Amino acid sequence: AAAILFYVALGAGIFTLAFWWLRGEPEEALIRTVTVLVIACPHALGLAIPLVVAITTAMGANNGILVRNRLALEEARNTLEGDLRDAIVRCQFEVHYQPFFDVQTGQLCGVEALVRWQHPENGVMNPMDFIGIAEESNLIHLLGDHVFQIACAQIKRWQDAGMPPIPTSVNVSPRQFQWDGIAERLLAIIEASGVSPSLLQIELTESAIMKDSDAARRKLSELKRHGVALSV
């Protein structure tokens, strides 16, 4: 749904851009396009900025117009980055759990931890709406820690409530996994929570592993040695 909203908003922005450009008012076109994007998809400005700049360049915008357009979009992105910093401090993130069931027995076999940002103005925001900015601003490490701590704490609550062990998958972003101390940090959070490492599964993308394969193997080996499951 978030992806659909983004493309609808981007389409509206491009239509606005083309309409005013064809009327011979390039500056008005860019001002109105920026307004549409900021209002309609503030959560995806990291994707919208390069697209709009590329389109306006292809349409022959002069440097002055391009600079003003880029600055307006960058200002909106910086606002969202500031909101993200506040959100981590104010604990505006929630973790939802998507269950997985055994197709033969119908029994619960695990869950995936999915982070959501309860933005005070924009409402519920999905990871695709803010992870890019979190990575660019290096807030991904604080955010990743926060999400992993929430997931471990929830496993402990299930455990204390007498529920059967529930394996839980947690996504780790490529930028987060690049940090040399990521394995030790995740293991420290698990130990502090008092849950078994075997109940955690780290979800990684291939790009996270391929960027530095030797370092990746070391981190993966350390996690596996302590019983943490891995999935790519």
Image (cartoon, rainbow, N blue to C red):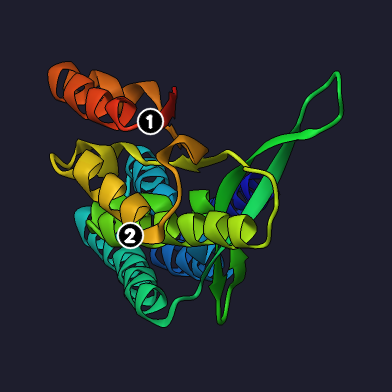
Mark 2 or mark 1, earlier in chain: 2
Q: Residues within 10 Å of mark 1 (few under 14, many from 20)?
A: some
Can you say which quadrant of the picture contains the C terminus? top left
**Relative horizontal placement of residue 134, taking residue 198 as reference (left or right):** left
Residue plotted at (43% across, 62% down): 30
- Residue 1 is situated, as x and y percent measured from the top left of the image, at 71, 49
Asked if residue 219 is positioned above or below residue 116 in the image, the reply reads above
Asked if residue 76 is positioned above or below residue 162 in the image, the reply reads below
Tell me the CA gap for discs 2 and 1: 16 Å
**Relative horizontal placement of residue 80, taking residue 116 as reference (left or right):** left
- Residue 57 is situated, as x and y percent measured from the top left of the image, at 32, 43
Front-lying residue, 181 or 34: 181
Residue 161: quarter of image: bottom right
Considering the numbered disc 2 on the image, is that residue within a helix, a strand or a loop?
A: helix
What residue is pinned by disc 1? 227
* Res 8 label: none
Front-lying residue, 109 or 60: 109
Front-lying residue, 61 or 220: 220
Q: Is residue 23 in sight in this rendering?
A: no
Residue plotted at (35% across, 46% down): 50
What residue is pinned by disc 2? 192
Considering the numbered disc 1 on the image, is that residue within a helix, a strand or a loop?
A: loop
- Residue 109 is situated, as x and y percent measured from the top left of the image, at 70, 33
Q: Is residue 157 in sight in this rendering?
A: yes
Asked if residue 129 is positioned above or below residue 217 in the image, the reply reads below
The type of residue carrying mark 1 is Gly
